């Protein structure tokens, strides 16, 4: 009887842990915008990680001279038809952009998991590297920033990373979201695939950390913690008055100028 109770307790705990981790993902199949509604008219692409589900993405061709490629890892809600609008400006600056959906989002098959989202980002990076092996950069927003850092650390060909409105670990953002239950977070939120543990593996590749000073979802202190843990070369841009949703909505021209300049510097390095 004791063995049975112990087995049931362990099983129940694992189920609760899995359920708690799943709260990071809010996928949707709703179409927020069609490709025809964007100025860049994206092409549909499909790819998959090894033994993974079929994934869907939009490939935004560069305007004018092709300067490089950006893999865009979106946040935890909706799907690429919502987030592509925040990345299309890069294609107008001469960068090809791959916006993709993690498993379970949009037209991508499967169900979202922490390991799965990283595997999906790796598949997207590999797809981009096959087309542009020497000039690929990874940009991630919020949850996507965490995924971008972990995946980029495993692909040395990635030239630079932008982490926007991002956190250092899943437990850190869970504790910040529910501070009254901070002591219980380790019991219900698993460790693993935390960006802070992969920063050193970026080695000499540039990292740009962007965070809204008034971020109401991921406190700016977490963005600063991520930046402090990173090695050089690194840059931190805290945007006054900006909240969680990309500062591009707040100051689009300055945002585009500063990020484009970062891309240029990163691609100019050996």
Image (tube, grey):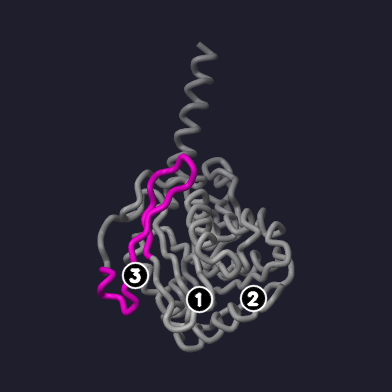
**Which label sits in the foreground, 2 or 1?**
2
Do labels 3 and 2 touch, CB within 8 Å? no
The label on residue 15 is none
Quadrant that contains the C terminus: bottom right
Q: Could you tell me how many numbered marks the image carries?
A: 3
Which residue shows up at 49% across the image and 78% down it?
66
Q: CA distance from mark 2 to mark 1?
A: 28 Å
Judging depth in this view, the residue of 182 and 174 nearest the camera is: 174
Numbered disc 3: secondary structure: loop
Q: Is residue 250 visible?
A: no
Numbered disc 2: secondary structure: helix
The label on residue 214 is 1
Q: Residues within 10 Å of mark 1 (few under 14, many from 20)?
A: some
Give, as a single range, the part of the protein colored magenta.
34-58
Q: CA distance from mark 1 to mark 3?
A: 33 Å
The label on residue 42 is 3
Which residue shows up at 36% across the image and 55% down it?
56
Does residue 7 show up magenta in the picture?
Answer: no
């Amino acid at each position: 009887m004791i063995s049975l109770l112990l087995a049931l307790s362990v099983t129940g705990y694992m189920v609760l842990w899995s359920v708690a981790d799943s709260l990071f993902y809010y996928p949707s199949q709703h179409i927020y915008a069609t490709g025809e509604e964007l100025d860049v008219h994206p092409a549909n692409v499909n790819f998959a990680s090894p033994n993974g589900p079929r994934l869907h993405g939009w490939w935004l061709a560069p305007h004018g001279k092709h300067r490089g490629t950006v893999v865009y890892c979106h946040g935890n809600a909706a799907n690429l038809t919502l987030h592509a609008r925040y990345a299309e400006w890069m294609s107008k600056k001469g960068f090809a952009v791959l916006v993709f959906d993690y498993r379970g989002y949009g037209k991508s098959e499967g169900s979202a998991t922490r390991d799965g989202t990283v595997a999906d980002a790796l598949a997207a990076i590999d797809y981009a590297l096959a087309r542009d092996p020497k000039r690929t950069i990874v940009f991630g927003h919020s949850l996507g920033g965490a995924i971008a850092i972990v995946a980029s650390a495993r692909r040395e060909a990635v030239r630079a990373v932008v982490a926007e409105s991002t956190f250092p670990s899943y437990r850190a953002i869970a504790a910040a979201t529910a501070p009254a239950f901070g002591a219980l977070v380790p019991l219900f939120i698993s460790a693993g695939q935390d960006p802070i543990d992969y920063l050193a593996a970026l080695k000499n590749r540039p990292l740009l950390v962007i965070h809204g000073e008034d971020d109401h979802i991921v406190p700016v202190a977490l963005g600063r913690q991520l930046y402090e843990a990173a090695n050089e070369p690194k840059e931190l841009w805290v945007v006054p008055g900006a909240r969680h949703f990309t500062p591009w909505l707040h100051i689009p021209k300055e945002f585009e100028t500063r990020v484009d300049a970062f891309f240029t510097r990163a691609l100019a390095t050996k």
